[in-house]
Image: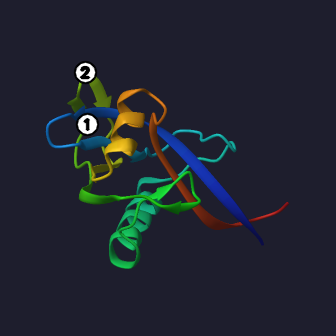
Amino acid sequence: MQRIEKQIAVGIKKSDGVKHVVYGVVLEPDVEDLQGDIISAEEIEQAAHNFMVSYQTIVDYHESMADARPVESYIAPVDFEMAGQTIKAGSWVMAVKIFNVDLWDKIVAGEYTGFSIGGWANAETD
């Protein structure tokens, strides 16, 4: 097995300008990612739980801590609609409170368009 680093980007689904909270899917099951891998609902649940137990931090472009914190994190129990888009059952959904005004302005301006999860995986080689 080979250990690889992965980054997965998923779009923001909605935002609340009064509360400065953004909502989006962190990971969606059974959909090919940018590296051509498919993540199961079980693996997504494990990653979401690990994040909440061990991290609960938001990092700006995978480099430095952002002045933001997760305020909701859950696995979608069924398909549902958020801001006109279908969220697939088994998806990891998160809401993040943005405390920094400059960061919020970048989100509103479209400079930040989604969540991007970084992590490591053991890849089986042929």
Residue 45, x across and y down, in percent: 37, 62
Can residue 12 be seen from the camera position used here?
Answer: no
Residue at 42% x, 35% y is 106
Residue 81, x across and y down, in percent: 22, 29
- Residue extending furthest bottom? 54
Q: Earlier in the sequence, mark 1 or mark 2?
A: 1
Residue 107 numbered tag: none
Amino acid type for the residue under numbered disc 2: Gly
Residue 20, x across and y down, in percent: 22, 43
Give the image quarter of residue 107: top left
Q: Secondary structure at mark 1?
A: loop
Residue 79 numbered tag: 1
Residue at 65% x, 40% y is 34
Q: CA distance from mark 1 to mark 2?
A: 13 Å
Mark 1 or 2, closer to the camera: 2
Can residue 114 be seen from the camera position used here?
Answer: yes
Judge from the rendering whether residue 71 lies leftward or rightward of residue 39; answer left or right.
left
Give the image quarter of residue 109: top left
Amino acid type for the residue under numbered disc 1: Asp
Residue at 28% x, 41% y is 23
The residue to which callout 2 is attached is 84
Residue at 39% x, 66% y is 57
- Residue extending furthest front? 102
